[in-house]
Image (tube, rainbow, N blue to C red):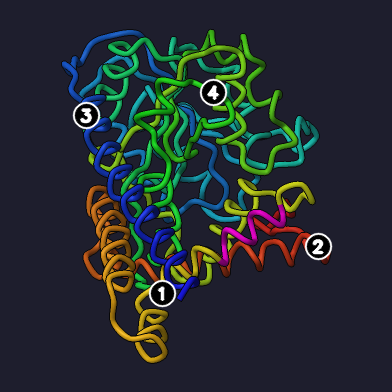
């Protein structure tokens, strides 16, 4: 009986927290995005690293060419691609003078991480007051740049990031990608925006805009060159130097085609999760405990069957069920608010199970010395 009481109390606490956190985040996101969008303003340098992106790059460049914001330059750097990426860059530089193409110098190694190394070689060419870093596998609504600049200016931000719409045809691929939902349902962005602490700062590299002056003041990507998850490292560096940041819901004006299948999604999300929660002794045990706890929370209705068999129905069973429903509802709301399909949105237990599996497998890779491979490179 004591086990049921403890479990029921934990479940109701987690359920209430998840529902309230999601609800307040949604209100915060809506308030942040209530801005007057203008098509004129300071120069924005869109910076794009591209490695073997022949399938994605045309879609992104077309979406950037159609921006309502007029004062932009679009800088693309070919990071030693083996496909038609360079041909596509050359083609689009002829179509629009705002698009400028570059190539990474293989002899220049600012860092062992390919994407950061490419960005470090590209950013010196940027002339804009703002740097808008986005991935080659994204696509932007016509007001994406204008909307982001307006938010930056209204809230006097130095750096902003957000969660795009994550698109994947595969159900299991979408389930793996939905690990990102923790960013919306468990992290109280409405509170962390006020705290402005590097410990709580959060970012997603598919969508980052920053003031160029602030970028150089804090040391930029060179300041996080040994970090596996460059986006998180960068925003933490900004807040460490007292620069103002915000995390928003970018799903209405940015979409990402990050992975096409479950295998690619598993490998990519595994790398990100392991980077956020590194396998260091100080936090390894607590994080593994948290993973096990989340598994129990996710499948609480199954444990309820166990209690019904051995104890019978009582008020604590009801408390457990209400807590789980609140948790599930919070997760569902967060998913739908960022445009996940309904089938994925109702699959919280499966999503959380895969999150735990990806983290444990990532730990195994690190412990056994198997580095992550990303686009043909060891990370």
Q: What stretch is highlighted in magenta?
A: 284-292
- Give whichever of 132, 341 is nearer the camera: 341
Quadrant assignment, res 297: bottom left
Task: Please tell me whether mark 2 sits on a helix, a strand or a loop.
Answer: helix
Q: In this view, does 42 lie above or below 361?
A: above
Identify the residue position indicated by label 4 in the image.
Answer: 197
Identify the residue position indicated by label 2 in the image.
Answer: 367
Q: How far apart are marks 3 and 1 (CA)?
A: 41 Å
Identify the residue position indicated by label 3 in the image.
Answer: 143
Q: How far apart are marks 2 and 3 (CA)?
A: 45 Å
Closer to the chain start, of discs 4 and 1, is 4
Q: Which residue is drawn at 29% across and 31% down?
A: 65
Say if mark 4 contacts mark 1, CB within 8 Å. no
- Give whichever of 235, 310 is nearer the camera: 310
Identify the residue position indicated by label 1 in the image.
Answer: 299
- Give whichever of 140, 9 is nearer the camera: 9
- Give whichever of 202, 207 is nearer the camera: 202
Closer to the chain start, of discs 2 and 4, is 4
Closer to the chain start, of discs 1 and 2, is 1
Task: Please tell me whether mark 4 sits on a helix, a strand or a loop.
Answer: loop
Q: Distance between the residues labelled 4 and 1?
A: 33 Å
One can see residue 265 in this view: no
Q: Residue at x 26, y 24 (%)?
A: 32
Q: Distance between the residues labelled 1 and 2?
A: 28 Å
Mark 4 Cα-neighbour bin, 10 Å: few <14, some 14–19, many ≥20: some
Closer to the chain start, of discs 4 and 3, is 3
Q: Going by the image, does 119 lie left or right of 224?
A: left
- Report x, y in % for residue 164: 34, 44
């Amino acid at each position: 009986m004591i086990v049921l009481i403890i479990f029921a109390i934990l479940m109701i606490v987690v359920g209430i927290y998840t529902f309230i956190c999601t609800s307040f985040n949604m209100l915060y996101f809506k308030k942040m995005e209530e801005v007057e969008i203008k098509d004129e303003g300071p120069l924005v340098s869109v910076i794009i690293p591209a490695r073997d992106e022949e399938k994605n790059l045309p879609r992104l460049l077309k979406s950037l060419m159609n921006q309502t914001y007029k004062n932009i330059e679009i800088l693309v750097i070919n990071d030693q691609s083996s496909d038609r990426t360079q041909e596509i860059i050359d083609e689009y530089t002829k179509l629009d003078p705002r698009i400028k193409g570059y190539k990474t110098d293989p002899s220049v190694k600012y860092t062992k991480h390919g994407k950061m190394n490419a960005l470090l070689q590209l950013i010196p060419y940027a002339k804009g007051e703002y740097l808008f870093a986005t991935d080659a596998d994204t696509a932007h609504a016509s007001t994406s740049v204008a909307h982001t600049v307006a938010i930056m200016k209204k809230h006097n931000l130095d750096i902003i990031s957000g969660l795009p719409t994550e698109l994947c045809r595969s159900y299991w691929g979408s389930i793996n990608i939905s690990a990102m939902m923790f960013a919306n349902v468990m992290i109280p962005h409405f509170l962390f925006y006020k705290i402005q602490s590097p410990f709580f700062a959060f970012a997603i590299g598919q969508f980052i805009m920053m003031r160029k002056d602030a970028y150089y003041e804090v040391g930029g990507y060179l300041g996080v060159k040994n970090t596996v998850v460059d986006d998180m490292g960068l925003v933490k560096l900004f807040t460490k130097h007292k620069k103002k940041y915000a995390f928003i819901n970018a799903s209405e004006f940015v979409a990402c085609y990050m992975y096409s299948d479950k295998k690619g999604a598993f490998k990519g999300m595994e790398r990100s999760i392991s980077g956020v929660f590194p396998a260091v002794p100080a936090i390894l045990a607590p994080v593994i405990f948290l993973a096990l706890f989340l598994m129990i929370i996710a499948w609480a209705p199954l444990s309820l069957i166990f209690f019904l068999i051995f104890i019978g129905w009582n008020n604590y069973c009801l408390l457990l069920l209400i807590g789980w429903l609140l948790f599930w509802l919070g997760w569902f709301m967060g998913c739908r608010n960022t445009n996940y399909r309904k089938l994925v949105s109702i699959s919280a237990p499966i999503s959380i199970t895969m999150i735990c599996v990806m983290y444990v497998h990532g730990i195994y890779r690190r412990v056994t010395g198997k580095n992550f491979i990303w686009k043909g490179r060891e990370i």
